[in-house]
Image (tube, grey):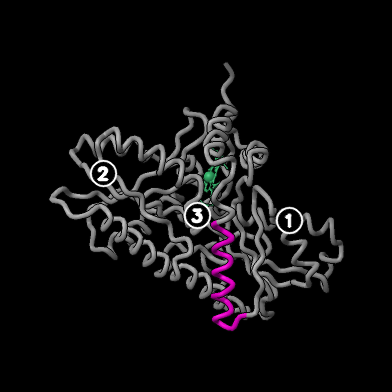
Amino acid sequence: MIGVSSPFDSVLFLSFGGPDGPDDVIPFLENVTRGRGIPRERLEAVAEHYFHFGGVSPINRLNLDMIEALRAELARRGLDLPVYFGNRNWHPMAEDALAEMYRAGHRRILVFPTSAWGGYSGCRQYHEDIDRALAALAEREPASTTPEGGVLLRKLPQYWSHPSFVAAGADSVRRALESLGDSEEPVRLVFTAHSVPSSADAASGPAAEGGGLYSRQVMAASKAVADALGIRDFDQVWQSRSGPPQIPWLEPDICDHLEDLAAQGIRRVVVYPVGFISDHLEVVWDLDNEAAEVAQRLGMDYVRADTVGTDPRFIEMIGELVQAYADGGGDLGAMGCGDNGRVCRDRCCVPVKRPARPRR
Ligand SMILES: CC1=C(CCC(=O)O)c2cc3nc(cc4[nH]c(cc5[nH]c(cc1n2)c(C)c5CCC(=O)O)c(CCC(=O)O)c4C)C(CCC(=O)O)=C3C
Ligand SMILES: [Fe+2]
């Protein structure tokens, strides 16, 4: 770690990005899938999901809402740290946010990532975004590479196990259970997170720990939320897989799982997307449309619990994290924490080489 003693002067809220209108959809998807072996047909199918919402992903508005709440939270804590917004895949791009921050005089930047998890997509790729933004800054502002002009971006750690994240999730599930109403029929609680290629999960976490970090974290977070509610019977499954069908991804998928539950005679389900911090497109399309339709066809009562979003405890958690690291302290060895794009552990969450698409 470098520059440990210097206090931080600003926060970069770093997210995935999403289209703001129909013309953005394809270029956005091309950014997301560049070099990742996602078939064109999948891209076109996902584009349709966005077109159902006028080509606008909810993610940008939701992030702006969280940022506004975070600004109030930092002010409440007496922390004078402006919050900027940047993304991996769409405007405002991380590169532009960083350039703007630099020009405004900021040199010590705490980065809050909108993913709670370890793994390539949830953690390492955010380090790569930081690295990319720094490389772009070096081109635009050559002084930024000198010792005097040096910029430090410190990524905050993974927060999937934070008690406030768990408590906010438990409250959301409680509300969803209440909305189902009283009945003799048992309710099954089902947690979902974004599926990833099985090879990516196997490579997640420090090489020395044997992999599987992402799926272990998702299971542990699900169990923590269920425990907080005293629920022992729950399932944890996956959603939103992409990639060619012959490549294995984490399973089962939520839609297949609903079929299984119906076959077991379960008629009421609450689905909590523990894997996401806001109700973005993967939630409002894949769960509120696709999975909800499957549940309806199966004659199930189905309620999707809210993501944590602007729940005050979740915003307090971000404030607490920022405060802990703002004076240069905090746990610098915590999983996911790293400076200027450096990952937290040796050979951690290395990207998996994707097999070439088979020729026909
Ligand atoms: C682990 C994980 C998270 C959670 C951690 C985090 O939050 O960061 C996440 C979040 C998100 N994923 C999102 C959208 C998409 N993800 C895609 C593709 C992929 N996701 C992957 C993994 C994850 N994704 C993977 C392994 C791929 C395959 C391609 C690749 O290896 O990169 C594609 C391409 C089309 C498709 O194939 O579906 C899209 C459009 C949105 C924005 C939604 C909106 O617009 O509201 C968000 C927040
Ligand atoms: Fe994704």
The answer to whether the beta carbon of the residue marked 3 is less than 8 Å from any atom of ligand 1 is no
Q: Residue furthest left?
A: 184
Viewer-side residue, 93 vs 310 = 310
Q: Residue 5's quadrant in the figure? A: bottom right
Mark 3 or 1, nearer chain start = 1
Q: Considering only vertical position in the picture, is 48 above or below 130?
A: above
Residue 342 appears at what percent x and percent y?
Answer: 64, 60
Tell me the quadrant of ligand 1: top right
Residue drawn where x is 67% and y is 65% of the image: 84
Residue beneath disc 3:
205
Prevailing SS of the magenta stretch: helix
- Residue 181: give x, y in percent of width and height: 22, 54
Magenta residue span = 62-79
> Does ligand 1 reach within 8 Å of label 1's beta carbon?
no
Amino acid at pointer 3: Gly
Q: Quadrant of the N terminus?
A: bottom right
Residue 70 magenta-highlighted: yes
The numbered mark at residue 95 is: 1
**Residue 323's quadrant in the figure?**
bottom right
Mark 3, secondary structure of its residue: loop
- Disc 2 designates what residue? 301
